[in-house]
Amino acid sequence: MTQSIKRLPILDLRRFAPDHPERAAALEELRHVARSLGFFYLTGHGIAQAEIDALTALARRFFALPLESKLEIEMRRSPHFRGYNRAGLEYTRGAQDWREQVDFGPEREKLTLAPGDPPWKRLIGPNQFPSALPELRPAVLKWIDDVTAVGIKVLQAFSEALGQTPDVFAPIYSNGPNQLLKIVRYPGRDQTESDQGVGAHKDGGFVTLLLQDRVGGLQVDDGAGGWIDAAPIPRTFVVNVGELLELASNGYLKANIHRVVTPPAGGERLSIPFFLGANLAATIPVLDLPAALAAEVSGVTQDPLNPLFREVGRNVLKSRLRSHPDVARAHHADLIDPAQKEAVPA
Ligand SMILES: O=C(O)CCC(=O)C(=O)O
Ligand SMILES: [Fe+2]
């Protein structure tokens, strides 16, 4: 594999503020980055380092708990795909990933569903939090609020970079965006044969804001057969364009492929990705791009193995069922399509 010397650019969120003198240049830069690599480091996000350090410390404490304390909130217990997964339970395109993780989403009451309700409503419900680490609940819920606010600012900047009003997407998120927060640990190479921490994929939401700890492993497709290492830079998030923005911009913006390579033997990687998505009931519109941008559009890249739907809830449910076959079998056997049943390892 060719190792590219390229690096992701660093963008400062403060330069997008309405009265900032560099705003026009910042929007131009964002448009270029989002159309080419689809990935950048974000500084100036306003999240206090103390909050970052506190959440990272809690993540470490969580993973250090005895297995039984972690299994108390095993995802298999949650029809809403919330909770803890041991390494090896998650699959990307049928190949096993190697990371342990806890998934959190919007904290809601479970719905009582009627027979005709759309299946995606099963995604709505409560999170699971570990009784052995009570501090985690308030920290996670505050973090979701705080990174959502940053994500919306980034989304507003993307909107303006596409020649739209900043709130063009508000109708499809202001009722409550769909958020997914993961706290992830990638164990070192000695515990696995393969180096797939998480296999090559695109993210599904509007934008992803990834907090990395000290150990690298994230790699971004450079479009020329190689990978760009997105090494951790303190006090930054790695931000990337998700498939919803690619769909809405008819392919002008690019949801780029990335993966995580397992750390070397003896090491571990800790990361906290956050995916900001639209309201589950929403349908993604196609934006009316200014003529100069529309002329460059070549359409959305549809992957026959992973079709994209404009109906947000349907799309999210599809990817959750695929990523977590054990939860699908335990709670949603009626939704697994027969072809997939065979493809998914038991
Ligand atoms: O852990 C990371 O650095 C990235 C994870 C990722 O790409 C994902 O969960 O979608
Ligand atoms: Fe990802």
Image (spheres, helix red, strand yellow):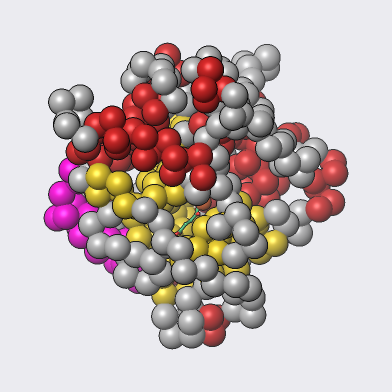
Residue 53: in magenta span: yes
Q: Relative to 103, does residue 346 appear above or below in the rendering?
A: below
Q: Quadrant of residue 70?
A: bottom left
Q: Is residue 40 visible?
A: yes
Q: Is residue 260 visible?
A: no
Q: In this rendered view, identify the residue nearer to me: 33 or 304.
A: 33
Residue at the image position 30 percent from the left and 37 percent from the top: 26
Q: In this rendered view, identify the residue nearer to me: 153 or 10.
A: 10
* Left or right position of 251 against 18: right
The percent coordinates of residue 69 (x first, y second) are 40, 63
Residue at the image position 76 percent from the left and 59 percent from the top: 345
* Left or right position of 35 against 234: right
Q: Quadrant of residue 268?
A: bottom left
Residue at the image position 57 percent from the left and 57 percent from the top: 221
The percent coordinates of residue 71 (x first, y second) are 47, 60
Residue at the image position 80 percent from the left and 47 percent from the top: 341
Q: Relative to 237, does residue 25 appear above or below in the rendering?
A: above
* Left or right position of 208 against 311: left
* Left or right position of 147 against 50: right
Residue 110: in magenta span: no
Q: Quadrant for the N terminus, please.
A: bottom right
Which span is picked out in magenta? Answer: 46-66
Q: Relative to 209, does residue 317 appear above or below in the rendering?
A: above
Q: In this rendered view, identify the residue nearer to me: 304 or 43.
A: 43
How many numbered marks are there? 0
The percent coordinates of residue 305 (x first, y second) are 76, 44
Q: Quadrant for the C terminus, please.
A: bottom right
The percent coordinates of residue 86 (x first, y second) are 53, 64
